[in-house]
Amino acid sequence: MTDEGSPTGGEVASGGRWSLITTISKQLGRTLVTLVLAFFLTPDEFGIVTQATLYVALTAVFVDAGFSLAIIQRAKLLREDIASAFVLTATTAIGFGLLTLVVAGPVSVLFDSPEVRDVLRVLSLSVVLKGFALVPVALLVRRLDFRRLAIAELVATVVGGAVAIASAALGADYWAIVVQTLVHDALLLVIVFAFVGRLPLRPNRDTTIEIARFGTPVMGAQLMQYGGRNADNILIASALTNADLAFYGIGYRVVLLPQQLLMQSAGRVAVPVFARLAEERQRAARYFSDATGLLVMSVGLLMVMVFVTAPEGIPFILGDEWSPAGRPMQLLAIGGVLQVMPGFVNPALLGGGRTTTSFRLAFGTTLIFLAGFSLGLIWGIEGVATGFILANAVIVPIAFHLVREELGSTYRSLSIDLGIAASGLVASGVVGRVVVTVTDSLPTLISLGLGALAALVVVPVPVLALRRNAVNRWINAGRMIARGR
């Protein structure tokens, strides 16, 4: 594949297939590891590492600063572009790694958690490892070489998870999660460098300045997105207990984090595609509509299963001490369906070079989330989760309005498709919960299984009855990805 021109159907489909395989496999692995670690750890111990990861995720925004996107989005890539981007990210990563060592103490005071200090000092190495991997990963994404990226991420996930579980079983407590992060990041760095080979190290001054200027609004948008995605955890960490953060955080890790990473995975394919379809707006609009429908239904089915099974399933798997996590997880699942609806909006904006619009959307989204979370905090973690639902309900129409301007389509048909799909998901969730409630005298596993089965039977009924053509388009899109062409 060359840098110029539209991607072929096979290239896009193969990239989408491998990206999907990577995300599903990686998230199944991460979710399983999270549940196993939660079995070994107390809610307070789990909350300590969650606090530390909030800081590490923030540093990742500043380390990337949009430099890797400059590699993906560039029409024609030169060696000096790669060198400039790599030197920028590597230098920034080292700087923030050192900064983490300095601010670890104040951050632990902010969270009123002394244990966070030592955790952050160790995780400063993770900040550096993540930064050095950004450009090699961006090169693989640009080439739509998701097969190699899948290998790197899956190996890192499996090995990191195995080491973490072994550490927890041997009594490492919350340090098991820290070990998991370091092993994952180190392996990912080594493997992606092995795939892309040696990078050029002679940056061009003008190119460096140009990439930095390009990345500034992108970093702003990513910073706003970080605020929107993590404001709930930050507020809980600051105002409530470590246990509350753990109860909310287990729902976040099991429900929202996989869903958000699935959106990021889809975005990896979508950004270069939208960039190359910038002059073919009708084709780009069709790609946006079909991909959105497929993403919503795929994520929606998973969220329904969580909604149906969470209240009884969490204490059944992790023990009664984790019971308070069930209801927030249900609420987050509802919000997750809404959040995924505009999942391709930002890739469409970035692919079209509208970084300023992307920043404005991220800024507005962050303000809406902050308002929802702050209001909900009055009622504890369930109130915060409810605020997440309401915030997403406000954001969805705003995001679709912006992408309509970018791609020149009214999306009336897509709105109808999504409305009918949502009705199917709601009906299936209600039926599933009714079945679980009615059969609560049966063994827990059987009751949950019957509820999940009932939900799966109900969800396609209104969609197939009222919008069969849309379902056919989504199925065809799925088949194209599966066949790699």
Image (cartoon, grey):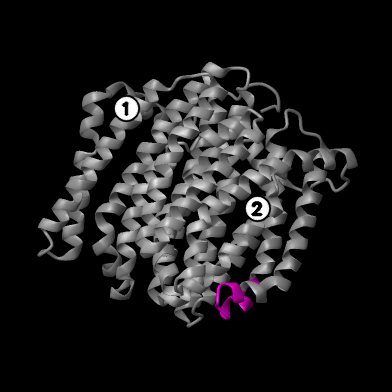
Residue density around tag 2, few if under 14, some if 14–19, many if 20 or more, within 10 Å: many
Dominant secondary structure of the residues highlighted in magenta in the image: helix
Q: Residue at x 73, y 32 (%)?
A: 74
Q: Quadrant of residue 416?
A: top left
In this view, the mark in front (1 or 2): 2
> Is 117 or 306 nearer to us in this picture?
117
Q: Amino acid at mark 2?
A: Val
Highlighted range, magenta: 108-122
Image quarter of residue 425 = top left
Q: Quadrant of residue 417?
A: top left
* Furthest-bottom residue in this view: 171
Q: Amino acid at mark 1?
A: Val
SS for tag 1? helix
Q: Is residue 485 visible?
A: no
Residue 479, image x and y in percent?
A: 40, 30
Which residue was labeled with disc 1?
471
Residue 113, visible in the rendered structure? yes
